[in-house]
Image (spheres, rainbow, N blue to C red):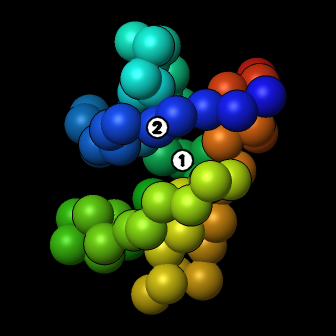
Amino acid sequence: MEHNIINVWFEDDKIFIQTSNGEKRSHPLNWFPKLQKASKEVLESFTLSPFGIHWEKLDEDLSYEGFFTYVK
């Protein structure tokens, strides 16, 4: 499954991802301990790849596939 991500943002202790076809998905940051503990500045310093989101300062990666199919 390919996801064309156009927006990633953080709000109300959640991470949100929006695709070019308008799909939005969010998960609580407490599902991702490294992200939950990070400052707003660090959270917002990510890079996008064809496969996911990477936070260099946290050595953390989230795959789009996992994000859009994972249910806890």
Could you tell me which residue is drawn at 25 percent across and 37 percent down?
Answer: 11
User: How far is mark 1 from mark 2, CA to CA?
Assistant: 22 Å
Q: On the image, which quarter does residue 36 sit in?
A: bottom left
Query: Can I make out residue 67 in this image?
Result: no
Q: Residue at x 41, y 23 (%)?
A: 20
Instruction: Single out the residue that lies furthest toward the bottom.
Output: 57
Badge 2 density bin: few <14, some 14–19, many ≥20, Cα 10 Å: many
Q: SS for tag 1?
A: helix
Say if 14 sits above or below 61 in the image: above
Which quarter of the rendering shows the C terminus?
A: top right
Q: In the rendered image, which quarter is residue 38 located in?
A: bottom left
Q: Residue at x 68, y 53 (%)?
A: 51
Task: For residue 36, say whether it is visible.
Answer: yes
Amino acid marked by disc 2: Ile
Categorize mark 1 by other alpha carbons within 10 Å: few (<14), some (14-19), many (20+). Answer: few
What's the residue at 43%, 68% (across, down)?
Answer: 47
Residue 23 against residue 29 in the figure, above or below: above
Task: Give percent across and percent down for residue 41.
Answer: 20, 72
Location of mark 1 (residue):
30
Q: Identify which amino acid the numbered label 1 is placed on.
A: Asn
Secondary structure at numbered mark 2: strand
Are the residues flagged by discs 1 and 2 in contact, CB closer than 8 Å? Answer: no
The relative height of residue 30 versus residue 44 in the rendered view (above or below) is above
Which circle's residue, 1 or 2, is located before the other in the chain?
Answer: 2
Q: Is residue 41 left or right of residue 35?
A: left
Comparing marks 1 and 2, which lies closer to the viewer?
Answer: 2
Residue picked out by circle 2: 5
Of the pair 21 and 58, the residue shown nearer to us: 21
Marking on residue 16: none
Pick the quarter of the image with the N terminus.
Answer: top right
